[in-house]
Image (cartoon, rainbow, N blue to C red):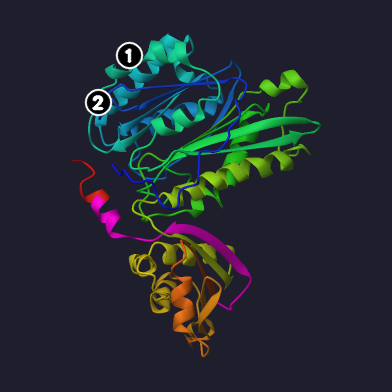
Amino acid sequence: MPTAISPLAPASFPEMPPIAGVRLATAAAGIRYPGRTDVLLALFDPGTSVAGVFTRSKCPSAAVDWCRDRIKNGRASALVVNSGNANAFTGKSGRAATTLTARIAAEAAGCKIDEVFLASTGVIGEPLDATKFADVMDRLVAEAAPAAWQPAARAIMTTDTFPKGAAAIVRLGSRPVTICGIAKGAGMIAPDMATMLSFVFTDAPIAPAVLNALLRDGVADTFNAVTVDGDTSTSDTLLAFATGAAAAHGVARIARRSDTRLPAFRKGFDAVLANLAEQVARDGEGARKLVEVFVEGAASKKSARRIALSIANSPLVKTAIAGEDANWGRVVMAVGKAGEPADRDRLSIWFNGIRVAHKGERDPSYDEAAVAAAMKKPEIMLKVALGLGKGRDRVLTCDLTKEYVAINGDYRS
């Protein structure tokens, strides 16, 4: 695992207030590495709503299948997350491990087994010994406490170099409600729903159907607009929990998407998702540059997204940025291969605000020294204008360095 913290990491873990109705605890169960904190338990007050989005991989983990089968009920009492082992591609033993994990948690917490949600991250293809949860579960339940956000975020890390958290306080009518989220993710990041693992919590009283709609809308331009290496995980899971505890302070339940208070909540909810998604890009394995790819003038927003992803996932573009080379030729290549409408002779390209190519050729005012200085910055804005229509979109990614190869070359060792 990496030891050096990403140079793109936030200066510190954010201040995150407690969420009424949520208690957290962590433990070292020896899932893969002895002595490493690798289990997170979250306990929820009765009546907590839950919604989720999951990987669209055709080879999902056993925990993803478990959650999909139970998310329709819309109620949650507990969440168990382990790192070190993804419990993916583990056959019948993987399914048995999810059942045993949920049963252990349900018995310790005194809740229904179908209200226990699970997530696993780590090595794919290795059996998960779920009996190890029994050794720590009673202690986790006894020690669970509010606001243990940073330990919770650390417990779910794999190749991450820093814990990821974000929070927002918004008003529903005249009363404040709190939203907190944690995430993990650094490699195998090209989500088709969310990110590797992310969990968002609020005390707002929100019906499961409304929470589900918020979540599905919210991931579109946040987690689904992030890529590190173009690989979609088997384990991608984003769960949102709404305890409803704010109702005790006069906040009326949100039961319909037409509720006039919902836009204010959505703004804070989406801000937490966006913050976490950016932290995933900042912690891309081996990353030294945060890269925002912005495409405008496309035939449609969908077309702009596809072109932006083609650029963001190109190893040639990413290695050029790692080498601080504004290689617009590689960007042209990525635009051309995307399979979307494009006109070479209308294409313009900028790196950090400096136009390097215009109308199908190198910009006549191109200044190598100015561009070289701009490429040394830790954050790179790569903008492409197609000149075809009004479609626009943006995607976050990072550069591709030798460290990425080193991390993934010995990940299972």
- Res. 348 in view: no
Residue placed at 28% from the left, 41% from the top?
A: 1
Q: Which residues are magenta?
A: 386-406
* Residue 333 pos. (x, y %): 39, 76
- Res. 139 in view: yes
Residue 253 vertical placement versus 222 (above, below):
above
Give 363 or 257, whichever is nearer the viewer: 363
* Residue 212 pos. (x, y %): 59, 36
Label 2: state its secondary structure. loop
Q: Quadrant of residue 155?
A: top left
What residue is pinned by disc 1? 134
* Residue 44 pos. (x, y %): 55, 19
Residue placed at 25% from the left, 49% from the top?
A: 408
Q: Quadrant of residue 55?
A: top left
Specify whether 206 is left or right of 394: right
Crowd around label 2: few <14 · some 14–19 · many ≥20 (10 Å):
few
What residue is pinned by disc 2? 34
Residue found at the far right of this picture: 174
Give 265 or 374, whichever is nearer the viewer: 374
Q: Quadrant of residue 309?
A: bottom left
Amino acid marked by disc 1: Ala
Specify whether 409 is left or right of 284: left
Specify whether 83 is left or right of 308: left
Residue found at the far left of this picture: 413
Crowd around label 1: few <14 · some 14–19 · many ≥20 (10 Å):
some
Mark 1–mark 2 contact, CB under 8 Å? no
